[in-house]
Amino acid sequence: MISPTDLRPVPFWSPAEIDAAIPRVIAHIQNGGVLAYPTETVYGFGGAIDTDAVGALVGLKDRPLGKPFLLLVSSSAMIGRLGLQMTHAASSLAARFWPGPLTLVLRGAEKRVPARLRGPEGGVAVRWTSHPALQRLIASLGDPLTSTSANRPRQPAALSASEVIAQFSQPVAAGALMVLDGGRLEPSPPSTVVDCTGPHLRVIRPGALPAEALRAVVPDLLGDQ
C-alpha cells in the first residue's frame, strides 16, 4: 500500500526551497531517474541525455517510436558545447525570442545526443527555458534536460505537481520519478516549434509565438499561414 509520505513532491517554489532541492535533484538525475518539473508552459518529464536515461523516460511516458523529446537549455553556450549547429536565421530567432516558448530543431550534436532524441529530419529540438527555477537547475546540472509533457498518452498535460502524482503514483512511490512542486501553472499554449534543418526555416508546430512575429525576424519563414 502506498502511503501519502511516499507521494510527497519536492518543494520547488521559493529561493530557499530551490537551493535545498537542487543537490538532491541532480543526484536523482545522475542516477538515471526521471524528473517531473514546472516549465513556462506545462509540467514536463525529463532527465539526463544519455541512452539509459532516455530509455527510462521512454518507458515512463510510453512514447511511440518516431516521436522524439526536446532538450531544455539554460544558455546559448550549452548549445555550443553540445555541438548543435545554429544557422544565421536560427540565431536571429534565438536572439529575439530566447529564453521563451520557442523550440528550434537543429542539426549536429551527433557525438552527444542519442538517436532517440532526433526527429525524422535528423535534428534535435531545443528550447532555452524562461522558467527561472528550471534555468538554475539546468545551469547547476551543467547539461540540458530532456523534456516532454508530464501526462499519460491522450491525457491533458499536467499543470500541477498533484496532477502528475495522480497519474504516476507507482513510479513516484518507487523512487523512479521525482516530482518538483513549483505551484499550479496557468493554462498556456505550447512552444512554437521551428525546423531549422533545411534551406528555409519552417513552422512545424504552431504555438505561443505566432508565425507573423517570427516572420518579422525571418521573412522567408515557411508554414503556419
Image (cartoon, rainbow, N blue to C red):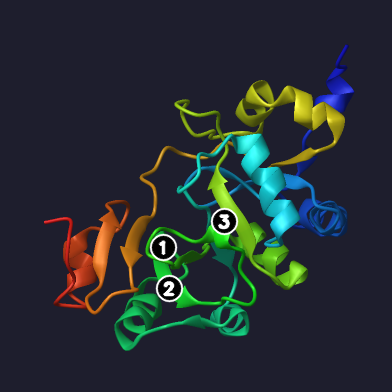
49, 44: nearer the viewer: 49
Say which amino acid is labelled 3: Arg
40, 45: nearer the viewer: 45
Instruction: Please name which of the two marks, 2 or 1, marks the residue nearer to the observer.
Output: 2
Q: Is residue 13 above or below residue 160?
A: below
Which residue position is annotated with label 2? 106
Query: Which disc number belongs to residue 116?
Result: 3
Which residue position is annotated with label 1? 103
- Spatial separation of the CA atoms under disc 2 and disc 1: 10 Å
Answer whether residue 182 is visible to the viewer in this image: no
Quarter occupied by residue 96? bottom left
Q: Is residue 187 above or below residue 46?
A: above
Q: Position of residue 116 (x, y in %)?
A: 57, 56
Say which amino acid is labelled 2: Leu
- Farthest bottom residue in view: 88
Q: Is residue 222 above or below residue 40?
A: below
Say if mark 3 contacts mark 2, CB within 8 Å. Answer: no
Earlier residue among tags 3 and 2: 2
Label 2 environment density (alpha carbons within 10 Å; few <14, some 14–19, many ≥20): many
Q: Position of residue 200 (x, y in %)?
A: 22, 76
Q: Secondary structure at mark 3?
A: helix
- Write the residue at 58% across / 45% down: 44
Asked if residue 138 lies left or right of residue 31, the reply is left
Q: Secondary structure at mark 2?
A: strand
